[in-house]
Amino acid sequence: MDKAIDKNEIRRFRRRRLLLWGGIAIVATVAVAGMMAGIAPTVDGRDITVGTADSGPLEITVAATGRVVPAYEEIITSPVDSRVLKVYAESGDTVKAGTALLQLDLEQELTELGKLQDAHTMQQQELRQLQLSNMTAISDLEMQIKVSEMNVNRLRIEVENERRLDSIGSGTGDRVRQAETSYKAGVLELEQLRTRLRNERQRAAASEQGRRLGVSSSDRDIALMSKTLRQGGIPAPLDGVLTFIVTDPGKRVAAGEKVAVVSDLSSFKILGEIPEGSSDRIGVGDRVSVRINGARLDGTVANITPQARQGVVSFVVRLDNPRDRNLRSGSRAELRVSFGYKSSVVRVPNGSFYHGAGEYKVFVFDGDDRLRRRTVHAGDCNSDYVEITEGLKPGDRLVVSDMEHYKTKDKLKIKWQ
């Protein structure tokens, strides 16, 4: 007869079996983890960009953004407060210089021009009347002077006659003195008339000059109003493309308000922007590398806005070839402005791994198909190269594309196709 097994013994047996299987599971887990740790993740070689460190010069640049705009455009503003009567063109139309774009209501200006012209006619008549009056006054004085000169000559002869008679005893001293006094009085009167003539001529010239200034001012007012009326037709100032125009007949526009823009789309420039903190690194005359639509163009900083706006400084890039076929108005561009030069540095090709000077964890080749993570320090850069100040030597190969997805890995294996 079989003996019954003690319940305590059964429990101890089951406990030993559980511990055994648990230990086996733990050992297996540790073994698998160790094997997995020893296996490096694999990366497809087609998904990475490889570069080789070398030694060479580095033209240092600072990054900026830009936008392609016409090299020349004319902003047309309303010459007066008015309203739009007619619109003759649409945005995008090609126009010739002088082509009417729209018509403003200029009835008030036409009335004002008529008043100016009437006032100008009156001023001209007043000037002619003043000139006639001055000529008459001057002619009267000139005639009085001629009469006075004749009288002085007569008195001078009488003085000579009285002196001669007195010398032969036929005259008297009183008659001589009387003749001399009359002669002196005539000379003074003649001199007074001559002085009056000089003064009258100066007065006449000054008064006529004042009237002429009034007429000239009126001429300018009429010319300005006539120009305003011509501009009221809003003609195109140059051959080009109409890139903006007010489209609503009846709309009120203020003097100086933009009503149209005509652009010359045959040549372009770049409007660049750079953070205010980097603005001290650019200057007028600096060379600029422009990348747009996959093409590279070159240019020069033409001018810089002196004040920042919302933390950004604007500048203009004049392109070496402003008619390049890759240029399209409104297109965005990546800019690199040159501001320094280093004759010899360790450098690697510029890639998406680089976001400015500092420390980076990069993957460096350890053989043909293995990568190991290494700490390097990057410095300045340009559009082609990044300076490596520590961590690499010429000849080292590394991944220069973004490897953020593998930032927790120390080594990788490359699968080449």
Image (cartoon, helix red, strand yellow):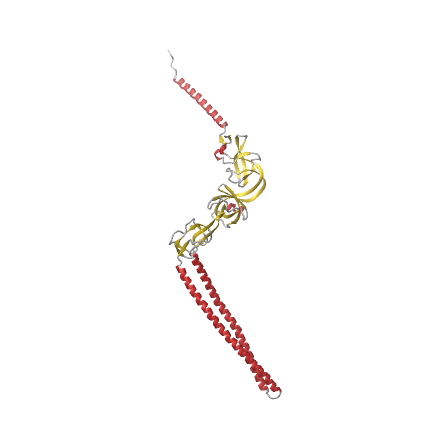
In the drawing, does residue 206 fall left or right of residue 169? left
User: Where the N terminus falls, by quadrant?
Assistant: top left
Most distant residue in the top direction: 1
Number of on-image labels: 0
Q: Is residue 407 in view from this perspective?
A: no
Image height of 409 relative to 7, above or below? below
Q: Residue at x 49, y 69 (%)?
A: 208
Residue 316 appears at what percent x and percent y? 50, 48
**Nearest the camera: 95 or 29?**
95
**Nearest the camera: 124 or 344?**
124
Most distant residue in the right direction: 168
Residue 334 appears at what percent x and percent y? 50, 43
Residue 15 appears at what percent x and percent y? 42, 20
Image height of 216 relative to 32, above or below? below
Image height of 155 relative to 103, above or below? below
Q: Which residue is drawn at 51% across and 69% down?
A: 205
Residue 225 appears at what percent x and percent y? 44, 60
Q: Is residue 150 in view from this perspective?
A: yes
